[in-house]
């Protein structure tokens, strides 16, 4: 327990020192300003325009900020041999990964919780829809933290980690779309052997990818909860994919280095 | 010491020189403005799904904003008469599917694209918009009867296309018993049948007892409204 608190404090101090917290807060305020400008220039339904734009902007900033911060932080810990030093103490690799995940997840949750009040103050977002969207953003950030930690600890380069993390996130958002194409047997996927392999590859890939496209629906902000799924589905997805990614990270740490 | 100062002066002078070059280049490049191209064809529903990355609402609002400001670029504007309204209405249709609850596409279509007044092209272009509005209004009258009224007005006064007028009139008549639309809506069918050239149907409807009752009720309500608001502020 003590290790978790110490790690969280350490990650928080690093995030503040690296200006990560300040950068995300400034970016969120800038997004609120930009969304307000778009809302005021809309011919109709300006509030809905502002909510959708700001919601997407907040999410993009959180995703890019977390992947970048975690990738570069882990890389720096590797360069300064900090990870090696920590692992020489009586601490298992699993505890190490879980402690850092909780540290990053805490920062992610704290920063993402700024989005809701900003949407409320800027565009008078409705209560239940805003609450659902806010909770969904926190869950999505937890998944992003797990993806970033997996990429950062598995790959030797911060740049590669940022690119792989962003790529995995985008695949998670597009997975359902690719699967729909594969299942519909349309487009370029005919019945030839090569196309069948392509279809199986897509189906295999999308079977393991998180369904990130279900998270953070702008329509919750505009029209309130609804649309076929809610927090239960998202929570289920989170409690499955986060342990999966963390276990993969622990396994990678065990077999590769240190 | 002198050499260091010299290097500092040189560095600042170089920086100022390059900055001035950039300002001069920008002044020289000012006449070059991005061309306002023809509106592209809209992507299909599946491509829209890919662009949305799971958040249809965000894509919907982005596309509304893009459509609203499409013809305004680089300090120049593209007149509405130069737009291909076939593409415009296809964009309205495709983007509208992303959020069936929103009225944005219809407000954009009626108050922006529908504001075209060029005598040579307005009729043909507004016909395309009216066709879309009529189709959308008839499909969901409870939410979109307002746009059915807009389409009926434009068809009667601007478009004057007999086929579209008949289709709109038939659809409006079929809503006579629909409690989700205003009671006076069927009254709009009569002038549309006249535009369609079906004078006999228009006369039959004019003489229909239910229609007469509707007309009296609407007239009474309108007079009451005028009396309440006064002649100077109808």
Image (cartoon, coloured by chain):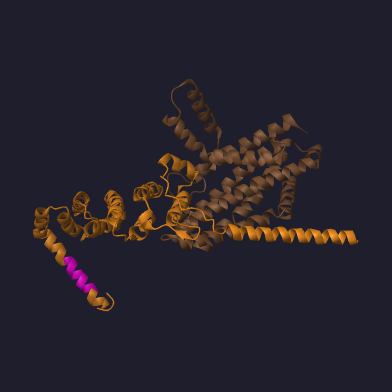
Q: Is residue A200 above or below residue A157?
A: above
Does the magenta run of residues contain B194? no
User: In this view of the protein, which residue sits in the foreground, A98 or A149?
Assistant: A149
In the rendered image of this protein, which colour is used for chain B?
orange
Q: Quadrant of the C terminus of chain A?
A: top right
Q: Is residue B202 above or below residue A164?
A: below
Work out which residue is located at the far right of the displayed protein and give it.
Answer: B1
User: In this view of the protein, which residue sits in the foreground, A108 or B156?
Assistant: B156
* Residue B215 at x, y percent in the picture: 15, 64
User: In this view of the protein, which residue sits in the foreground, A250 or B164?
Assistant: B164
- Is B113 positioned to the left or the right of A176 in the image? left
Q: Residue at x 65, y 42 (%)?
A: A162
Picture quarter containing residue B195? bottom left
- Magenta residues? B217-225
* Residue A25 at x, y percent in the picture: 63, 58
Q: What secondary structure predominates along the stretch shown in magenta?
A: helix
* Residue B55 at x, y percent in the picture: 48, 47
Counting labels gives: 0
Q: Residue at x 51, y 30 (%)?
A: A202
Does the magenta run of residues contain B220? yes
* Residue A6 at x, y percent in the picture: 75, 49
**Residue B68 appears in the figure:** yes
**Residue A126 appears in the figure:** no
Chain identifier, colour brown: A
- Is A214 positioned to the left or the right of B20 in the image? left
Picture quarter containing residue B4? bottom right
- Is A42 positioned to the left or the right of A2 in the image? left
User: In this view of the protein, which residue sits in the foreground, B180 or B120?
Assistant: B120
């Amino acid at each position: 327990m003590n290790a978790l608190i110490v790690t969280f404090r350490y990650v928080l101090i690093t995030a503040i020192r690296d200006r990560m917290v300040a950068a995300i807060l400034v970016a969120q305020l800038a997004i609120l300003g930009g969304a307000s400008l778009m809302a005021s220039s809309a011919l109709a339904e300006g509030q809905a325009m502002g909510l959708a734009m700001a919601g997407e902007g907040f999410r993009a900033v959180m995703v890019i900020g977390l992947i970048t911060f975690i990738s570069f932080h882990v890389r720096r810990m590797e360069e300064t041999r900090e990870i090696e030093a920590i692992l020489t103490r009586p601490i298992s690799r699993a505890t190490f990964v879980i402690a850092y995940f909780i540290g990053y997840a805490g920062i992610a949750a704290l920063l993402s919780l700024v989005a809701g009040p900003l949407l409320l103050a800027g565009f008078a977002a409705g209560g239940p829809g805003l609450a659902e969207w806010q909770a969904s953003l926190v869950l999505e950030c937890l998944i992003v933290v797990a993806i970033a930690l997996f990429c950062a600890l598995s790959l030797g380069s911060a740049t590669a980690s940022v690119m792989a993390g962003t790529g995995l996130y985008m695949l998670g958002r597009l997975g359902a779309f690719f699967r729909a194409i594969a299942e519909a047997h349309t487009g370029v996927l005919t019945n030839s052997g090569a196309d069948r392999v392509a279809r199986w590859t897509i189906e295999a890939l999308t079977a393991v990818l998180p369904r990130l496209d279900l998270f953070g629906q702008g329509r919750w902000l505009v029209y309130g909860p609804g649309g076929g799924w809610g927090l239960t589905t998202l929570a289920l997805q989170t409690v499955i994919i986060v342990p999966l990614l963390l276990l993969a990270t622990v396994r990678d740490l065990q077999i590769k280095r240190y | 010491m002198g050499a260091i100062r010299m290097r500092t002066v040189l560095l600042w002078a170089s920086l100022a020189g390059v900055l001035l070059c950039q300002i001069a280049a920008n002044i020289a490049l000012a006449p070059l403005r991005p061309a306002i191209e023809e509106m592209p064809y809209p992507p299909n529903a599946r491509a829209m799904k890919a662009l949305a990355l799971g958040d249809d609402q965000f894509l919907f609002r982005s596309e509304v904003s893009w459509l609203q400001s499409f013809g305004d670029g680089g300090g120049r504007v593209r007149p509405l008469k130069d737009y291909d309204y076939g593409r415009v209405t296809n964009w309205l249709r495709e983007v509208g599917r992303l959020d069936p609850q929103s009225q944005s596409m219809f407000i954009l279509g009626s108050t922006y694209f529908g504001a075209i007044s060029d005598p040579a092209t307005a009729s043909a272009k507004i016909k395309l918009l009216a066709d879309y509005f009529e189709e959308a209004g008839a499909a969901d009258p409870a939410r979109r009867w307002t746009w059915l009224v807009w389409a009926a007005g434009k068809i009667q006064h601007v478009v004057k296309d007999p086929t579209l007028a008949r289709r709109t009139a038939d659809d409006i008549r079929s809503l006579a018993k629909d409690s989700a639309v205003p009671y006076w809506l069927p009254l709009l069918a009569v002038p549309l049948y006249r535009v369609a050239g079906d004078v006999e149907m228009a006369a039959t409807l004019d003489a229909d007892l239910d229609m007469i009752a509707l007309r009296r009720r609407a007239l009474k309500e309108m007079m009451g409204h005028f009396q309440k608001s006064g002649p100077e502020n109808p």
